[in-house]
Image (spheres, grey):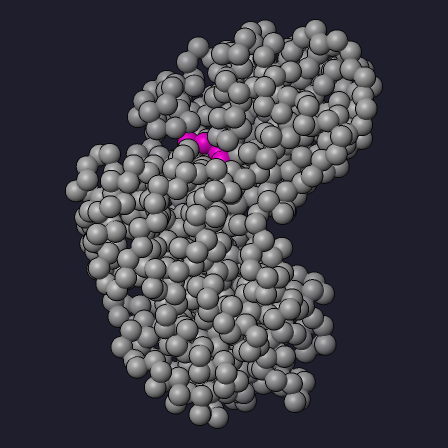
């Protein structure tokens, strides 16, 4: 992942260098270019330096608008009026804005209560209102007007992501602190217990409060006996009270996970040292778009909560203005709907050149697929109210700054009825399996395992750690080293950055998974073709040790590393094992009858793109950490070492195989799917394997 981010950073820097070049014909506005001017009102909190963030976001947008219209005979100019959400009388402001003919749209409501006040007047008056607020109540109340546009999924999703983190961290019980009278807190109160039950978590209590006094609820939650407490506070001041109460309860206090209220430059500014260690989730920019990196390059500071969504709101309005210029008589609502409905082709992301491509396509009458700083700008197809997929940061305050531990989604992309019919539980996206083909297997006579960590370097610690953890699990279950082929770079245990030489762990305080390891091949000794030879049993000078299975041998394969669409990376520098190479190797394995059953588990980004083409093989089954279009997610960040210790998919896999190897193949998929937040675990070739409800992992794990 860090390798990909470095590539992205280089690309971003290159783009901005290009955008500041002397290429007048393409990068700068035409002299005296007439502008279509529109007034956009922004109502957001302005205290504690937040005003600077909002204004910088529009400075960035203005820069990119200039580039976007550099090939046109006109441009679009958004004239921004700012109002302080925290100090304005919002009812009076909404009344005034609703009567103004010059207001093109209003963007505002970082806080749900404020957004509800604004929406009550603006949406009913026919004013386009784009909000950053996340309460479900807001969507349910004003979706039918057609004038509300919410730039994130609702807090139903945020609650789900928070609870999924509890499961991923190994928690068994959970409690909630939230304001039961507040629109923001009400969503958590309404959905928390249901979601916890669906995830198999014991609910230790819902500690709701009214008004401004969170003290009693915080004190009670601190001694609830829950493993984790999710806190959805109404105000930043509430966070300080909660932290104080939990600190006073000592080492046995539950671990706190805050909602998006815990993220933002104003949080650290107001709480100071007390903010240290605050952890939770917050909606933000999709890391693949590079928005956060670009913001830092431009302004030498981190964006705050809502920056990406605010940028996207302004960008969509810019497109809508141009669409109306091209389609006389089209309303703002219909222009926005036409923009987000576009699926002709992918026009890139939010940067100036991308925006120019969108403007050019719209001018030609095309309908481009629009992506913003926050990700794909897909909205529900019935009332166009909610963006359907939101990326959530898993944040933590460390040394006075926010670090992003992980990126999570709950796949809102398939919730097309979300605003009308409520919310579809994630399980609706799970694969279903029939009885499978009727296959006659030879008697089981032996086991072989092939374990590969296909990355190098300290930053990729987690890949080798996970493979070594799997190695130790197999040894504990009875495998001998003669029956395991282990391929790792072996550059982590004694790395100069390792404060514990000779020690590798997959969790804090865990066992040393490097202990008594017998490595068969170092990664730099092999290439992708060598891997295929090892798998198919083809001995060469480079590969004297190979899988020597026969019709009675069960093969267990585990791969952890990086991936690109269509390939499993090999040391990040080579082409990797492509889908075609993998399929050819499996064909050879089948033709030579070198296996009885084969189960392969793959922890890489885009792993599904390799194995969705590896079907039709009797007795083989493939579990991937992600579908063909997704990145997989890291797990367990070690702030002392500065690395990820494990991957989400793998930590769940090992947990469910340790002393539970009789788990069925279907139940294993179920647990992997639910606990791997941020990507979709997939199973391939199940129809040629047999009945997954009756087949168990015992056949592979216990020799």
Q: What span is colored magenta in the figure?
A: 644-648
Q: How many circles with numbers are drawn on the protein? A: 0
Q: What residue is drawn where x is 41% and y is 72%?
A: 115
Q: Which residue is more in the foreground, 496 or 202?
A: 202
Magenta-span inclusion, residue 647: yes
Direction from residue 541 to residue 179 in the image, left or right = left
Q: Quadrant of the C terminus?
A: top right
From the top left corner, tell me how far across and down residue 34 is, in percent.
54, 89
* Dominant secondary structure of the residues highlighted in magenta in the image: strand
**Which residue corresponds to the image point at 66% horizontal and 61% vertical from the top-left?**
346
Q: Nearer the viewer, residue 690 or 265?
A: 690
Instruction: Please determine whether, in this image, residue 146 is positioned above or below residue 256.
Output: below
Q: Which picture quadrant has residue 54?
A: bottom left
Q: Position of residue 38 (x, y in %)?
A: 49, 86
Residue 512 appears in view = yes
Q: Is residue 378 magenta?
A: no
Q: As displayed, is residue 556 above or below residue 479? A: below
> Relative to residue 541, is residue 1 drawn left or right?
left
Position of residue 564 relative to residue 120, above or below, is above
Q: Position of residue 557 (x, y in %)?
A: 63, 22
**Residue lying furthest left:** 248
Horizontally, is 188 left or right of 385 in the view? left
Q: In the displayed structure, does residue 575 sit left or right of residue 275?
A: right
* Residue at figure coordinates x 32%, y 59% from the top left: 179
Residue 37: where, in percent of width, then height?
50, 87
Identify which residue is drawn at 72% across, 72% down.
Answer: 366
Q: Is residue 538 visible?
A: no
Q: Looking at the image, which is closer to me, 696 or 484?
A: 696
């Amino acid at each position: 992942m860090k390798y990909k981010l470095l590539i992205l950073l280089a690309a971003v820097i290159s783009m901005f260098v290009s955008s500041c070049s002397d290429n007048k014909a393409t990068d700068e506005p035409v002299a005296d270019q007439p502008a279509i001017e529109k007034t956009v009102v922004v109502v957001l909190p302005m205290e504690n330096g937040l005003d600077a963030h909002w204004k910088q976001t529009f400075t960035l947008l203005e820069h990119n608008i200039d580039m976007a219209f550099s090939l046109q005979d006109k441009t679009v100019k958004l004239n921004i009026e700012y109002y302080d959400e925290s100090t304005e009388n919002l009812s009076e402001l909404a009344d005034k804005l609703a009567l103004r003919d010059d207001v093109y749209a209003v963007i505002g409501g970082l806080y749900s209560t404020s957004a509800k006040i604004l929406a009550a007047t603006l949406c009913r008056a026919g004013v386009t209102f784009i909000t950053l607020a996340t309460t479900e109540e807001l969507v349910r109340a004003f979706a039918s007007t057609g004038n509300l546009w919410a730039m994130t999924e609702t807090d139903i999703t945020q609650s789900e992501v928070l609870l999924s983190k509890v499961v991923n961290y190994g928690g068994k019980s959970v409690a909630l602190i939230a304001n039961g009278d507040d629109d923001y807190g009400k969503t958590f109160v309404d959905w928390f217990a249901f979601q916890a039950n669906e995830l198999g978590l014991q609910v230790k209590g819902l500690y709701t409060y009214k008004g401004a006094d969170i003290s009693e609820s915080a004190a009670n939650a601190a001694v609830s006996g829950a493993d984790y407490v999710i806190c959805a506070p109404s105000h930043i001041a509430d966070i300080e009270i909660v932290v104080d109460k939990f600190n006073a309860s000592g080492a046995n206090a539950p671990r706190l996970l805050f909602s998006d209220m815990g993220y933002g430059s104003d949080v650290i500014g107001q709480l100071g040292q007390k903010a240290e260690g605050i952890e939770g989730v917050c909606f933000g920019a999709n890391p693949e778009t590079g928005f956060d990196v670009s913001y830092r390059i431009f302004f030498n500071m981190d964006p705050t909560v809502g920056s990406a969504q605010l940028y996207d709101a302004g960008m969509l309005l810019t497109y809508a203005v141009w669409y109306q210029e091209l389609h006389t008589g089209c309303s703002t609502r219909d222009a926005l709907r036409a923009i987000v409905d576009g699926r002709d082709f992918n026009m890139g992301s939010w940067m100036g050149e991308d925006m120019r491509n969108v403007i050019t396509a719209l001018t030609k009458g095309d309908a481009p697929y629009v992506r913003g700083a926050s990700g794909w700008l897909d909205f529900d197809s019935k009332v166009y109210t909610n963006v359907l997929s939101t990326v959530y940061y898993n944040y933590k305050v460390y040394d006075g700054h926010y670090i992003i531990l992980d990126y999570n989604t709950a796949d809102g992309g398939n919730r097309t009825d979300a605003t009308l019919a409520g919310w579809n539980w994630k399980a609706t996206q799970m694969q279903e399996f029939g009885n499978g083909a009727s296959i006659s297997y030879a008697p089981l006579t032996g086991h072989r395992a092939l374990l590969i960590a296909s990355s190098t370097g300290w930053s990729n610690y987690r890949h080798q750690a996970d493979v070594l953890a799997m190695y130790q699990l197999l040894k504990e279950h009875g495998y001998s080293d003669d029956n395991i082929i282990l391929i790792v770079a072996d550059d982590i245990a004694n790395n100069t950055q390792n404060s514990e030489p000779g020690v590798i762990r997959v969790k804090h305080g865990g066992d040393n998974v490097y202990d008594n390891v017998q490595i068969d091949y170092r990664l730099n000794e092999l290439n992708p073709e060598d891997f295929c030879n090892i798998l198919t049993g083809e001995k060469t000078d480079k590969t004297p040790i190979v899988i020597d299975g026969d019709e009675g041998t069960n093969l267990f394969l585990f791969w952890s590393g990086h991936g690109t669409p269509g390939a499993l990376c090999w040391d990040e520098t080579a082409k990797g094992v492509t889908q075609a190479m993998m399929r050819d190797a499996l064909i050879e394995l089948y033709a030579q009858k070198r296996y009885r059953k084969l189960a392969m588990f793959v922890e890489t980004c885009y792993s599904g793109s390799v194995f969705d083409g590896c079907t039709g093989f009797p007795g083989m089954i493939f579990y991937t950490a992600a579908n063909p279009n997704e990145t997989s997610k890291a797990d367990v960040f070690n702030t002392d070492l500065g690395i990820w210790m494990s991957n989400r998919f793998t930590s769940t896999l090992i947990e469910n195989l340790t002393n539970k190897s009789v788990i069925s193949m279907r139940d294993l998929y179920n647990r992997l799917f639910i606990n791997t937040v941020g990507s979709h675990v997939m199973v391939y070739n199940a129809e040629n394997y047999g009945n997954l409800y009756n087949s168990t992992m015992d056949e592979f794990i216990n020799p």
